[in-house]
Image: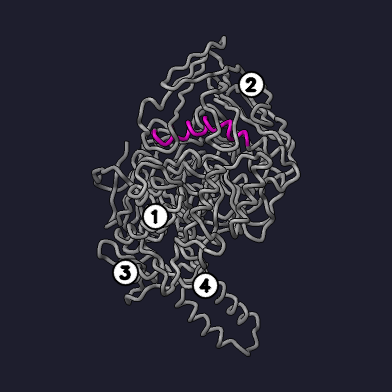
Amino acid sequence: MITKYTYGNPFQTDAVVQKLEVQNGDVPYFTVAKTEEQLQFEYTLENEEKVYGLGENVRGINKRGWIYKSCCADEPNHLEDRTSLYASHNFLVLDGGKEQFGVFFDYPGIITFDVGYTHLNELKITLSEPDADVYVMTGESILDIVKQFRQLIGRSYIPPKWAFGYQQSRWGYMNEADIREVVKGHREKKIPLESIYMDIDYMERFKDFTVNQERFPDFPEFVKEMKAQHIHLVPIIDAGVKVEEGYDVYEEGIEKGYFCKKENGEYFVAGVWPGKVHFPDVLNKEAREWFGNKYQVLLDQGIEGFWNDMNEPSIFFAQDRMDETFDKIAELKDKNLDLDTFQQFTGLVGSLANNTDDFKKFYHNVDGKMMRHDKVHNLFGYNMTRAAGEAFERLSPEKRILMFSRSSYIGMHRYGGIWTGDNKSWWNHLLLNLRMMPSLNMVGILYTGADIGGFGADATEDLVMRWTQLAMFSPLMRNHSAMGTREQEVYRFDHVEEFRKIINIRYGLLAYIYSEYMKSALNSEMYFKPLSFVYTDDEFASQVEDQLLVGDSLMIAPVYNQNAKGRYVYLPEEMAMLRFRGVDDYDTEILPAGHHYVEAGLFEMLVFVRPDKILVLTDGGEYADEVDCDHVKALAFVKTKAEYVWYEDDGMGKDYENPDNYGRITIEKGGNCVYTGSREKKIEVKLL
């Protein structure tokens, strides 16, 4: 059951798609304190109570013991002491107390979640203004509560099937030759590859919706050349529009008044990659439509996927603050910079980038009303991606377009996915990747993944290998790195053949991964689940934060420590362990419920099949269209009778609800297999 409570005059974020009657009185479970300045909710946590949710954030799956702030931030250092990352996902589920419930704070400004930080047994949630819609959910289980919430906020984004293939990216692919080299490196070694990403260098002087003609002299023809090799090019789009006379996007935005302005009516000027930029006012419906239509420039050249970046929005400097800073620094010239004045000097420069005070300096035009940015800050990335998603429905209504973003708010999940931002080539970020996934699924973000190998810093071969084994199960599987770091395309390492075999497993698993994703999206369910969400009576399951359930059939337990030869695994029930070295090279072992140490060499990937469940496996391929889903192996761990509901469509259209998309595999204990469905299948049964 979901109940809605309204405080003050909340801004309508469009996060919620269902209309509910507002209840009288205060939100249950919490002590509520209202002032003219803020709104505060307090709740006493029991000793064993768990707090799940908050989407993209640092630390563990259980969020107790830290303070989190919903304030979308360009934060590349995902350290334990950070309180904000790129997204704001204000949904929590409390489990293990007197009552189990979920709560969503639909509020676009800054919120602080003190989850047992100040006081160990106190949850305190502070909204910076007293205006919000608050939704409370109760249900039979955590999964029931999450499903109700997901139905409240609408169906998750569905990408094209090719977007589930292996993808390669690097900031620094400068021209056609660089991209051809990467394609050649994969194809000659027969390493599967689906797409290559184009970072800011493909643009003409970092201008959105342009292509550098010197580096890509005939871009539409180059797109065709890549497609002939089954490679999709995916260009980046940034939030800031370059201030430059003669640049059509800039001049149109000025003419129509579609950029964010200061209180005095002048356009707000910030600095990002191109230097001075204006931000499109994506909270203005007309401006959002205008900006979304700009994607057609690249769609018309054959592009079928995009990634939106720098859309917190990231600000290198605000021009007004920069001018003030230069004046203050000039006053320090020729002075003796002792400790205090030197710190003053460095503080002036250090406070330029992403200064939250600058959020108060510009405004949005929302239905004719001027709204100061800091009050709706967390909606910018959401609405930039919404602009694209709504445009694709107009410009390409019959075909799915790949779209994901760096910044997000609940509601954006209907228009695209996210990647988890500029992580580092650190082993603890590999574990953080795993822990983020279920929390993101809880808020509807299913198409997600982290940069394999890490974006910043220098990756090692073993880190890229272990990260690839985890990312095997992420819907978004992308190797991405920063300019100036070690090149980490897998064909550059020593063990190329082992990488080829491991990545080919992804294509062997593609039928399963795609099926489980689609069922999760269409049924408002989670693709990644913590053990405690399913094994609710197992007291130890909630302590396990380095294993996940993936879809209906599998559990994963990746290795995330350097030089580890194996790891400890907890099984809530008897499972069949598969030790994969290639798509057709694996060993099977049945393990009883309980605690185990299992070996896992660097080139081995552990997958666990649950009892009476089935894993569909193909021979793989070098790209998605090469995968033969009509000839599959059904790996079944049968205790009584194993069943699997298989979803399959054409991967590009939008006929999601067609009953012909579903089939069912049933395997008896003796190995007898029955398949019912509209598609012809040849199924080879392998009992585990």
Q: Earlier in the sequence, mark 2 or mark 4?
A: 4
Q: Which residue is mark 2?
A: 592
Q: Which residue bears the numbered disc 4?
A: 352
Which of the marked residues, 3 or 1, is nearer the chain's N terminus?
3
Q: Is residue 47 visible?
A: no
Mark sitting earlier along the chain (1/4)? 1
Front-lying residue, 134 or 669: 669
Residue at numbered disc 3: 257
Q: Nearer the observer, disc 1 or disc 4? A: 1
| Residue in the picture at 54% in, 59% down | 216
Badge 2 element? loop
Q: Is residue 239 left or right of residue 137?
A: right
Q: Nearer the viewer, mark 3 or mark 4?
A: 3
**Magenta stretch mostly in which secondary structure?**
helix
Please name the residue shown 73% across and 35% down the image: 601
In which quadrant of the rendered view does residue 243 lie? bottom left
Are the residues flagged by discs 3 and 1 in contact, CB closer than 8 Å? no
Left or right relative to 432: residue 41:
left
Q: Nearer the viewer, residue 19 or 668?
A: 668
Q: How many marks?
A: 4
Task: Kindly identify the amino acid type of the residue bearing the numbered disc 2.
Answer: Pro
Quarter where residue 570 is shown:
top right
As drawn, is 412 to the left or to the right of 164? left
